[in-house]
Image: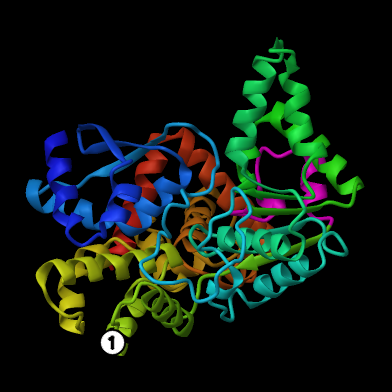
Amino acid sequence: MIELWGEAVRSIEALVKPSQREQWLRPIQCIGISEGRIRLRAPNRYHKEWFEDNYLPSILQDLETRTQSSFTVDFEISDGEVTSPPRVSTPTPTVDLCPVPAISPGLEPRYTFDKFVVGPTNQFAHAAARMVADAPASKWNPLFIYGGVGLGKTHLLHAIGHEIHRQHPDWKITFITCERFVTDFIGSMMNQRRQGGVNLMEEFRARYRDQPDVLLVDDIQFLSNKDSSQDEFFHTFNALHHAHKQIVLTCDKLPGELSGLADRLRSRFTWGLLTEIGHPDLETRVAILKRKAELESLVLPDDVALYIAAHVKSNVRELEGALLHLSARASMAGLLMSKEFAEETLRKLIATTRTGLTIEAIQREVAAYFDVKLADLKGPKRHRAVAHPRMIAMYLARRLTAMSYPEIGSRFGGKDHSTVISAVRKIERLAAEDPGLRSVVGTLESHLRQG
C-alpha cells in the first residue's frame, strides 16, 4: 500500500517546481497504510500544515481514484519543535505582495495582516488585533480571539507577531501552540534533574516567563482537564501580565464555555478583550478565493469563485482547499477552470462540507427522529422525553450553523444563551461517554448534511 502512496505523490510532481518538490514534498514520509488510515511523518509543524493545505487533497483524490476507497490521515511530527520553514526558497509560487522585511522565529510567513481578508464576521477581531499589534500591552491584555476551526484565528495570531516584530525588531516574540506548552512542561517536569548543569524546569520557566516580550498561544482550549499544566500557565500568565508583556490567546470557545478549566484562569482570560471570528458570509468567501487565486497565480473566473463560495461555507481552510484541489485537477487534466468542471470535480468534496442548514430544519429533523411535537421542542416543557431531544437539537444547531448561542436560544422559545451553552456542553460530554448517544447524534448529523 505504501507503494500506492508513492505513485499518488508522483502524479502531482510534474505540477510542482523542483525546488518546492525538494522542500515540501520529499520531506513527507508515508510510514504506513492500514484499514483506511494513512500514517505520515513530517519534519515539523510547518511542513505538515503546508503539505496539508497545498498537496494533500490532490494526492488523496488520486489515491482514492486508484483504490476506490476513502482514507483518513494521521500525522507524526519528527522533531516536535515549532520552527520557521526553511528559507532556501519561498513556499508560494509568486512573490509576496506585501513581504515582511524580517521573519520572527516561529511565525508563518504567509499569515500577515495584508493577506487577511476582512468581512463583517471578522472585522472587529481584525481591528482589535491591529490595535494590539500597534500598542502592545497598553490596553487589551490579554487579547482573546475565539471562533470555530479554520476561520482565521491562527492567521491573526501570527499577523500580530509579524507586525510587532516589524515595529520592535529587538523584542522577543514567542509563538507556541498550547499543546506544545503542555508537552514542554511535562517533559521538563519529568526530567527536572540537572542535565549538563542545567535545571530543565528553571530553563522552561525562563523561556516562557522571563524571556518573552510577547506571548502568542494558539488553541488554549488544550489546557482543559490538565490541572498541573493549568497551574503552570497560571503562573506564566501572572508573571508576564505583571511585567506588562502582551499576551494573545486563541480558542475555539469563550472562556466561560471551556469545561475543565480552573476558574482563576477563566477569569484571567477575560481581563482584556474577547473578540469572536465568525463564519464568513458569501461576499467574504468570494473575496478570500480571489485573494488566494491571486497569490497562487491562478486564473479564477467569477462564476467559479461564486460556485465554490456558495457551496463551501464551513471555514476558510476548506474554502481554500477546494480551490487548490480544483486547480490541481484542472492542471493535471490540461483544462481551464470552468463552472462545469468545478461542479463535476468538487461534487464529492462539497457533499461532505457543512451545508447551509437552518435551525428550523434541524428542529424538524430532531422532532421527527424522537417523535415529539415541534412546538414542544421549542416550548417550555422540561420532562426528559422533550428536554433530551431539545438539548441534542441545540447541540446540532451550534455545530452545523453559524448561529451564536443567543440566536439559537431565541429560536427555542427565547431560551437564555446560558441554557444553550449548558445543553451543548452536556451533549458533548455524554456523547463522549455513551456510544449509543454518539451514534444517534452522528446519524442525525449525517441526515442533515445530506439534506
Q: Is residue 37 above or below residue 67?
A: above
Residue 374 magenta-drawn? no
Seen at 15% across and 73% down, the residue is 344
- In-image side of 421 versus 71 (left or right): right
Residue 224 visible in the current orientation: no
Q: Is residue 28 above or below residue 99?
A: above
- In-image side of 56 versus 387 (left or right): left
Foreground residue among 176 and 218: 176
Q: Quadrant of the C terminus?
A: bottom left
Q: Quadrant of residue 103?
A: bottom right
Mark 1 sits on what residue? 301
Task: Return the x and y of residue 353 as percentages of the image width and height.
Answer: 33, 63
Task: Return the x and y of residue 82 as percentages of the image width and height.
Answer: 55, 41
**Which amino acid, by three-letter code, is at mark 1?**
Pro
Q: Tell which residue pokes out farthest to the right in this image.
A: 242
Task: Return the x and y of residue 442 as percentages of the image width and height.
Answer: 35, 49
Give the structural element (helix, strand or loop) at label 1: loop
Seen at 56% across and 52% down, the residue is 424
Q: Is residue 247 above or below residue 129?
A: above
What's the magenta region? 251-271
Seen at 67% across and 70% down, the residue is 125
Task: Return the x and y of residue 127 as percentages of the image width and height.
Answer: 70, 75
Residue 279 visible in the current orientation: yes
- In-image side of 21 versus 256 (left or right): left
